[in-house]
Image (cartoon, grey):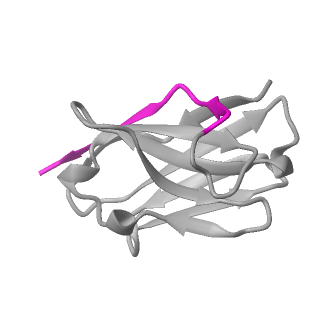
Amino acid sequence: QVQLVESGGGLVQTGGSLRLSCAASGGTFTSYTMGWFRQAPGKEREKVAAIRWSGGIYHTDSVKGRFTISRDNTKNTVYLQMASLKPEDTAVYYCAASRSWPMIEADYWGQGTQVTVSS
């Protein structure tokens, strides 16, 4: 059983930056594709970014050039660096782990962290 714990969310102004972190435990970190999903009020959950253990990377079109996913396999941690934030980025962000690539769905989820971008 893999446990995922997110941190780093908060309130930021338009154009600001945040870094989300997700610490994993209870499994072999390098066995998993790690990713970030988000869900805004009244909207479906969407995949934001994903990264393979070996470094293959995906970012959804709406965040390309602004968000960067990375992972530190020595710390069992995945990060989402977010810059040039927009109000439409406001959502609960969930860390996820999957045994597959591409990451279509997740086998494990974190509890979520709120990101709010004020205009």
User: Is residue 75 rendered to the left or right of residue 80?
Assistant: right
Residue found 51% across the figure and 57% down from its top: 49
Judge whether 59 appears above or below 112 on screen: below
Q: Determine if the magenta segment contains residue 61.
A: no
Residue found 55% across the figure and 66% down from its top: 58
User: Is residue 66 rendered to the left or right of residue 88?
Assistant: right
User: Is residue 71 rendered to the left or right of residue 73?
Assistant: left
Q: Tell me the quarter of the picture where residue 51 sits.
A: bottom right
Which region shows up in magenta?
A: 106-119
Q: Position of residue 89 (x, y in %)?
A: 28, 51
Q: Position of residue 28 (x, y in %)?
A: 88, 41
Q: Determine if the magenta segment contains residue 115.
A: yes
Q: Tell me the quarter of the picture where residue 95 sits.
A: top right
Work out which residue is located at the far bottom of the displayed protein and give it: 65
Residue found 50% across the figure and 37% down from its top: 94
Quadrant of the drawing holding the N terminus: top right
Q: Position of residue 45 (x, y in %)?
A: 38, 39
Q: Tell me the quarter of the picture where residue 110 sits.
A: top right
Work out which residue is located at the far left of the displayed protein and give it: 119
User: Is residue 87 rendered to the left or right of residue 23?
Assistant: left
Judge whether 15 appears above or below 7 on screen: below
Specify whether residue 115 is in view: no
Judge whether 28 appears above or below 34 on screen: above
Specify whether residue 105 is in view: yes
How many dots with numbers? 0
Residue found 40% across the figure and 75% down from its top: 65
Q: Position of residue 39 (x, y in %)?
A: 35, 37
